Amino acid sequence: MKKIVPTDPRYHGGRFFTRVGGRRVATLLFVALVAIEATDLVFAVDSVAAVLAITTNTFLVWTANAFAILGLRSLYFCLAGLLRRFAYLHYGLAVLLAFAGVKLILSETPVGKLPIPLTLGVIVVTITVSIVWSLLATRGEEGDSGGPEEEVASQAPGAAGARPVRDAGPHPGRVPDTARHDSRRPS
């Protein structure tokens, strides 16, 4: 990234670009944004094989990938809280990837393409079984039904099983200048 856009390794708040020594340079926030967006593109391109396993209609492939790029991150934040409960979901996704590979191979043999209702049925059944299996296996674990309010209340001073709360100081979430590591300063 430094070869394409000059960057400054210091923290500059919420700015993507700043001026250092009269030169316009990118900040670490801009580098993080590029990395996150590049990851979205990689996942969207990665899903092309899955879409092609269902259809070869060009319009559907393009629109599915466009919606994947637009909705992937928001879907992640929507499901992030439940992710710890989906302990066996990765097994279901592995089965679906194997099924997609077999389906692509079969489409080039005399067997031909599998019917779309069969493909969608395998997808729905596999995901449903892996989610139900996960939810049954993780039933009753700590933090099962509690939202953020319950978690905060259970950590209140004096609450049973409460963890000690570290004092954040006058500016929570902000790292004091003296605590930052400067790579130019000798250690």
Image (spheres, helix red, strand yellow):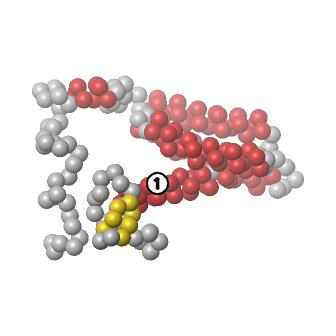
Residue 5, compared with residue 141, is above or below; it is below
Which residue is at the front of the view, 92 or 59? 59
149 relative position to 163: left or right: right
* Residue 145: image location, x then y, percent: 37, 25
Q: Is residue 1 visible?
A: yes
Image quarter in which the N terminus is found: bottom left
> Which residue: 60% across, 52% down?
44
Rendered image quadrant of residue 18: bottom left
* Residue 37: image location, x then y, percent: 50, 54
> Which residue: 19% across, 60% down?
180
Residue at disc 1, secondary structure: helix
* Residue 117: image location, x then y, percent: 76, 35
> Which residue: 29% across, 57% down?
12
Which residue is at the front of the view, 49 or 184? 184
128 relative position to 119: left or right: left
Residue 100, compared with residue 31, is above or below; it is above
- Dot 1, how many residues are within 10 Å of its Cα: few (below 14), some (14-19), or many (20+)? few
Which residue is at the front of the view, 14 or 19? 19
The kind of residue on which mark 1 rests is: Ile
Q: Which residue is mark 1?
A: 36
* Residue 160: image location, x then y, percent: 17, 26
> Which residue: 80% across, 43% down?
114
161 relative position to 70: left or right: left
Residue 153, compared with residue 186, is above or below; it is above
Rendered image quadrant of residue 161: top left
